[in-house]
């Protein structure tokens, strides 16, 4: 039987301070999408009023009741056009509180889902009440749907829970000036969860237009970055962007999708990335950060490192030359690609690993090397491991934690470990552990400042935005040494020193990036790519006032992450 196809659309436009004008804009753009005959339309965040308030009472006064005329008009338009509609508003609740909530209306105008934001950014925390319950996943005529909004998607927990609860489509309404929403935070949620993401952002000023100049002067944010960043988009489960709107013009885009494709959670090697999760190891993610103290983070301000691009990482002579070159350039940490001749032959790979362990430490001097090898396991088998090597030999052995089909023979490790080195705390990960957002969250919670991934990529999204996003949402410097260029080159990420929005920046002007670090992409030619990392900056996790990437994560609404099958 042919899979059901549905047409989804996203509309982006400007919202100001007049509720009647804003309602008219919402209805206008719903009417405009009629030309593409959609089944579902997603609108931006805060459609009733721009996110700028005199005080909490003002916020409540411009918020809309669920049974008020604003939302009744949206519901009526959904019924008139026979489309499902997601609209996000600040909504009046009991006791004078307001919430930022996404509301899903059916094609008959019925309210199907009411989902409140789980993590607010900056001043939103002063006016809006966060969610007290996990977001619903609802069965609809367009598929199983979950809702989230803006900052909910800058970290992984909220979208992850929706996908784990069975959502095929996760619908994101945004009110964002950040250019890395579109390039990073939106598409990665599709690839890592293998779901469709339908995301609508705004364009035009996000603050009162008469105050743009004064706000720019007071915050140091150039005026163009006080506008919505647009680029509303629809993303497939493999991370492919199916449609994207303009960065600065009102409009809509649409795509035809098959929601049932999101039920397939398998990687190209056959690994089911949901079935192979290790919820019993993620318990700390759903525990109160108030009771979790980060270890002391004493990383140096500057670390000279190198990522090696090799067309044959198992050529020891070539690898030795790269190490010598990197050391001559002053590298203190050298990331090598995996050194595994053939994953289907662990015995041969283990024999080669013995040669590596006998040879490479002799070349280290004061530098450290990272790669992946196959080493003997406790049960007389083998284990796929990411390793750290120094002049004293094997310093850290991180066994693969998550099962994968291509390394099905590997004995699994039961924890993620790290190593304190002169430049800071270092972790290494096998390729098939790096795709899980829980992995990097646990590293961040354990105080890791630098991580290295010897990567054997299987999917484009890993190198296009996946690992870059891991670095961004956890504030960890990252070295990715890939053994193939098929999905893109390896890279390094250097954490920015100036990071917290709305604070004085010393080293750079605000450039539109919310959390993306400096991205050093490697050359495609074999050789050494010298990079600079900033271990000390990993201690800074505050993206905006009252929004700490770790301390303010929605830990209390993350039960799906730690629920064992």
Image (cartoon, rainbow, N blue to C red):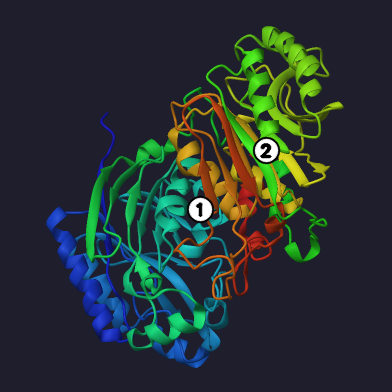
In the image: residue 289, left or right of residue 186: right
Q: Quadrant of residue 399?
A: top right
Establish if 14 lies above or below 385: below
Q: Secondary structure at mark 2?
A: loop
Q: Secondary structure at mark 1?
A: helix
Quarter of the image with the C terminus is top right
- Identify residue for label 2: 278
Which one is nearer the viewer's eye here, 108 or 508?
508
**Residue ranking furthest to the front:** 328
In the image: residue 84, left or right of residue 402: left
Establish if 97 lies above or below 254: below
**Count of numbered tags:** 2
Q: Quadrant of residue 379?
A: top right
Residue 59 coordinates in the image, percent (x, y): 46, 87
User: What residue is at 39 percent from the left and 81 percent from the top?
Assistant: 207
- Identify residue for label 1: 159
Check disc 2: other Cα within 10 Å, few if <14, some if 14-19, many if 20+: many
Residue 376 shows up from this direction: no
Residue 280 coordinates in the image, percent (x, y): 72, 42
Q: Earlier in the sequence, mark 1 or mark 2?
A: 1
Establish if 170 lies above or below 545: above
The answer to whether marks 1 and 2 mark residues whose Cβ atoms lie closer than 8 Å is: no
Which one is nearer the viewer's eye here, 180 or 40?
180
Check disc 1: other Cα within 10 Å, few if <14, some if 14-19, many if 20+: many
Establish if 94 lies above or below 295: below
Quarter of the image with the N terminus is top left
Residue 82 coordinates in the image, percent (x, y): 20, 60
């Amino acid at each position: 039987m042919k899979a059901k196809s549905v047409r989804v659309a996203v509309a982006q436009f400007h919202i100001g301070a007049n509720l009647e004008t804003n309602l008219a804009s919402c209805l206008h753009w719903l009417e405009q999408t009629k030309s593409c005959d959609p089944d579902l339309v997603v609108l931006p965040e805060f459609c009733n009023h721009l996110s700028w308030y005199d005080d909490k009472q003002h916020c409540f006064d411009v918020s809309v009741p669920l049974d008020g005329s604003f939302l009744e008009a949206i519901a009526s338009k959904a019924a008139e056009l026979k489309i499902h509609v997601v609209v996000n508003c600040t909504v009046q609740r009991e006791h004078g509180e307001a919430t930022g909530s996404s509301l899903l209306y059916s094609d008959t105008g019925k309210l199907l889902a009411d989902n409140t934001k789980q993590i607010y950014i900056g001043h939103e925390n002063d006016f809006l009440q966060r969610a007290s319950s996990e977001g619903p996943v609802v069965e609809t005529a367009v598929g199983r749907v979950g809702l989230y909004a803006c900052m909910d998607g800058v970290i992984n927990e909220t979208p992850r829970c929706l996908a784990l609860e069975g959502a095929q489509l996760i619908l994101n309404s945004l009110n964002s000036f950040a250019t890395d929403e579109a390039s990073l935070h939106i598409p990665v949620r599709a690839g890592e969860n293998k779901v469709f993401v339908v995301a609508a952002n705004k364009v035009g000023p996000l603050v009162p237009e008469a105050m743009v100049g004064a706000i720019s002067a007071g915050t140091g944010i150039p005026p163009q970055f006080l506008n919505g960043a647009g680029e509303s988009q629809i993303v497939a489960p493999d991370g492919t962007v199916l449609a994207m709107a303009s960065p600065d013009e009102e409009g809509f885009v649409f795509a035809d999708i098959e929601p049932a494709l999101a039920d397939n959670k398998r990687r190209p090697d056959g690994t089911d990335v949901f079935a192979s999760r290790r919820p019993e190891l993620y318990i700390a993610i759903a525990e109160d950060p108030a009771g979790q103290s980060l270890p002391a983070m004493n990383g140096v301000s500057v670390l000279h490192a190198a990522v090696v691009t090799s067309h044959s990482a198992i050529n020891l002579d070539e690898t030795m030359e790269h190490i010598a070159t990197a050391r001559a350039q002053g590298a203190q940490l050298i990331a090598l690609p995996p050194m595994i001749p053939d994953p289907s032959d662990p015995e041969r790979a283990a024999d080669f690993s013995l040669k590596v362990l006998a040879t490479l430490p002799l070349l280290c001097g004061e530098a450290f090397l990272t790669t992946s090898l196959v080493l003997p396991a406790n049960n007389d088998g083998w284990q796929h491991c990411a390793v750290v090597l120094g002049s004293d030999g094997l310093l850290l052995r991180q066994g693969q934690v998550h099962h994968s089909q291509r390394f099905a023979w590997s004995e699994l490790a039961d924890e993620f470990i790290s190593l304190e080195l002169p430049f800071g705390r270092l972790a290494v990960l096998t390729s098939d552990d790096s795709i899980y957002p829980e992995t990097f969250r646990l590293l961040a919670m354990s105080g890791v400042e630098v991580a290295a991934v010897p990567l054997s990529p299987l999917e484009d999204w890993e190198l296009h935005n996946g690992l870059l996003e891991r670095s961004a949402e956890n504030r960890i410097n990252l070295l990715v040494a890939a053994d193939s260029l098929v999905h893109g080159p390896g890279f390094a990420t250097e954490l920015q020193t100036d990071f917290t929005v709305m604070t004085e920046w010393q080293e750079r002007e605000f450039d539109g990036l919310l959390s993306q670090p400096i991205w050093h992409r490697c050359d495609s030619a074999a050789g050494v790519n010298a990079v600079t990392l900033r271990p000390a900056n990993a201690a800074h996790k505050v993206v905006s006032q009252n929004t700490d990437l770790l301390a303010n994560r929605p830990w209390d609404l993350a039960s799906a992450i730690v629920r064992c099958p």
